[in-house]
Image (tube, coloured by chain):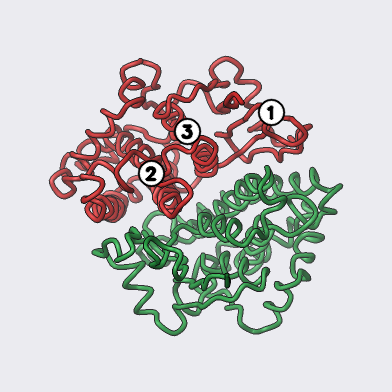
Chain colours: A green, B red
Amino acid sequence: MSPPTYELLYHPSIPGRGEYIRLFLEATSTPYTDVGQSSYDEVRSICCSPSSLHDAAGNPPPFAPPALRVKGEGKNGGDLVISQTGNVLMYLAERTGELCGDGGGQERWWVQGLAMTALDLSNETHDTHHPVAVMDYYEDQKEESLRKAKDFRANRIPKFFGYFERVLKGNEKEGKGKYLVGSKLTYADTTIWHVLDGLLFAYPKELAARKKDYPILLDTFYKGIKEEKGIKEYLESGRRFPFSMGLFRKYPELDRQ
Amino acid sequence: MSPPTYELLYHPSIPGRGEYIRLFLEATSTPYTDVGQSSYDEVRSICCSPSSLHDAAGNPPPFAPPALRVKGEGKNGGDLVISQTGNVLMYLAERTGELCGDGGGQERWWVQGLAMTALDLSNETHDTHHPVAVMDYYEDQKEESLRKAKDFRANRIPKFFGYFERVLKGNEKEGKGKYLVGSKLTYADTTIWHVLDGLLFAYPKELAARKKDYPILLDTFYKGIKEEKGIKEYLESGRRFPFSMGLFRKYPELDRQ
């Protein structure tokens, strides 16, 4: 049986939430099509239409991108469409048997809990530049953004970073500071790594000032993930989209002054 | 083999995010202990300590409550601790084989995607009274709350409600407007139902004004879930905590005027 064909349904040309899924696929050398790059109209009609209903295979419409379409894995031989980033990651882990620790056992629940916590930090980072109205411009909610970013830097970054530092420390015997769970790469690692990379882009001064407080997370771990098989090749390929005006944005006035 | 013993680790006396897990357990008549009601110190030491490390069975510390502890299901016969609400729900579905549609097939991924979307709406509701600083008082971010609540009522409620109305409509042949997926109750249903119940408490005027626009969601569906086996008994038991000052709060100035 040949492996299924995975199609990522996401906006083109930005990392965004789609990147958490891309990193899973790249780290496992799983072939996939990034549909938004060639057929964004198709992505929009599936994921962004305010009137879309269930498709022919009974898939409910996604609320928003990203979604994953898996050829032939749906009902009656149709395609399966799965939405919500964390849900897609767990599906890929189950379907491929990769990046979820000891497989059928306890570790995959830990991996998913840690990945979802990393995605919470990703959402909170987004909200620092859109604290009160998601569809309005940043410039129209800048005062509120300044206040939220101040709290984010003072309280939320230390809370999340302190947490992941502790998890790395608690797993140091097996993970050597390089992995959150067990002794090899999981999608909890790739997910928090991308959040860190986004924060280094968006809040460079804050992260520089915090670096000494979280030596495992911001040094051993952050650097180590870049050297992982699959990830290293992806980072060197030029295929990874740079951060721009998506989830992680560089507004110097929101960073540490 | 007797079923495992489930222990909910959560704050006492509020519905909060723990309620999504309670509803799963109640709807399936699964016995559980709500540890926070009798031993809140234990919950805090596991879920809320800024210095907790991995426990004896290797469980990483939860980032925050709720978490689920499952006796004897951890490594080496210890307990398993799972965190993140959506992760706990998926674990319970897999472990019990209940509330996840057609079981091993496609529907459980749809159920999880829909439940996670409902939890996103739950989080956005929380953020209407804490838009810029999660640890500060509402009264100290009231101006920002007024603005966020206005956007939430005008844009986010219609977007989410319109989405779930569409999903109910797309599944009407099987679900009869009573279920989001298939022809029987899933945890996607119990999760969005609790969000609706919380919004009816927090934003009663807004929901009254919107009722005619979402007849399946706010009438057929909302009423139907209350009659489900397990749920009906729970609602009549007096054991369900009333809404107060948690996720869903009644600040009349944030509601439609």
Dot 2 lies on which element? helix
- N-terminal label among 2 and 1: 1
Q: From the viewer's perspective, tell me whether residue B96 is left or right of residue A191.
A: left
Q: Which residue is mark 1?
A: B72
Q: Chain of mark 1?
A: B
Q: From the viewer's perspective, tell me whether residue A31 is left or right of residue B117.
A: right
Q: Above or below — where is B87 with respect to A1?
A: above
Q: From the viewer's perspective, tell me whether residue B8 is left or right of residue B216.
A: right
Query: Label 2 vs label 1: CA separation?
Result: 28 Å
Q: Above or below — where is B49 with respect to A195?
A: above
| Crowd tier of the residue under label 3, counting other residues whose Cα lies within 10 Å: few below 14, some 14–19, many 20 or above | many
| Label at residue A130 | none
Q: Which residue is mark 2?
A: B188
Specify the quadrant that holds the C terminus of chain B.
Answer: top left
Q: Position of residue B77 (x, y in %)?
A: 74, 30
- N-terminal label among 1 and 3: 3
Specify the quadrant that holds the N terminus of chain B.
Answer: top right
The residue located at (35%, 64%) in the rendering is A136
The residue located at (41%, 47%) in the rendering is B102
